[in-house]
Image (cartoon, helix red, strand yellow):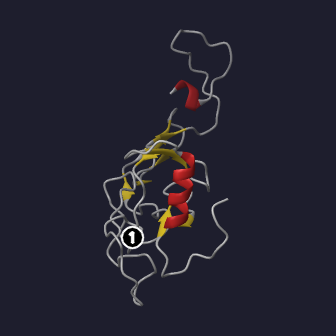
Amino acid sequence: MICLNKVKPSHHIWSCDQCWAVFHLKCIKSWIQRCNSAGGLEFDWACPGCRYHRVERMPEYTCYCKKVPEPELNPHWLAHSCGEVCEKDRGCPHPCPELCHPGPCARCTAVGGPGSCHCGREQTATTRCGDPKQWSCGAACGQALSCGTNLRPLWHSVCA
């Protein structure tokens, strides 16, 4: 357990980039120090929220998009936000267009090229940006394995 106190807008925080849990910065630093006996620049620890394993430097207080260290509390912005455009990488050519925010970035809404299932039975004229261009339609395809055997129907995701 880290602590039971509420996180207030005036508190410095650390937010996990895997489970999006938010902790007081002083509490997460204490947690990290308890997990590591030897001092150094990098620490071996796991997020107390999701247990995602990390080996990294001691966390610092930054805004959610990690652009601004020590963001000032502003009544016009979300607490712990810098008020700037997020611009985090979403796994596609289009960075996040929302203002600095907690949690994961929304999926890209840009339109991508055409797509189809592995066997070609299902086809679409467009896909969403970042989505796969091929998928399994779930029907048995009966194609032979790369070794040449075809003992049973195969699923498209296996034989693609």
Residue indicated by mark 1: 63
Category of crowding for the residue at label 1, using alpha-carbon neighbours closer than 10 angstroms: few (below 14), some (14–19), many (at least 20):
many
The structure residue drawn at horizontal position 48% and vertical position 69%, both measured from the top left corner, is 13
The structure residue drawn at horizontal position 48% and vertical position 82%, both measured from the top left corner, is 10
Q: Amino acid at mark 1?
A: Cys
**Quadrant (top left/top right/bottom left/bottom right) for the N terminus:** bottom right
Residue 116: x and y, percent? 47, 41
Instruction: From this view, report whether residue 127 is shown above or below residue 74.
Output: above
Residue 34: x and y, percent? 57, 51
Name the foreground residue: 19 vs 128.
19
Name the foreground residue: 131 vs 138.
131
Instruction: From this view, report whether residue 49 is shown above or below residue 10.
Output: above
Name the foreground residue: 149 vs 99.
99
Name the quadrant containing residue 59.
bottom left
Q: Residue furthest top?
A: 148
The structure residue drawn at horizontal position 36% and vertical position 81%, both measured from the top left corner, is 72
Residue 31: x and y, percent? 56, 55
Residue 39: x and y, percent? 43, 45
Instruction: From this view, report whether residue 159 is shown above or below residue 115.
Output: above
Left or right, 55 with respect to 121, comes to left
Name the quadrant containing residue 82.
bottom left
SS at mark 1 in the image: loop
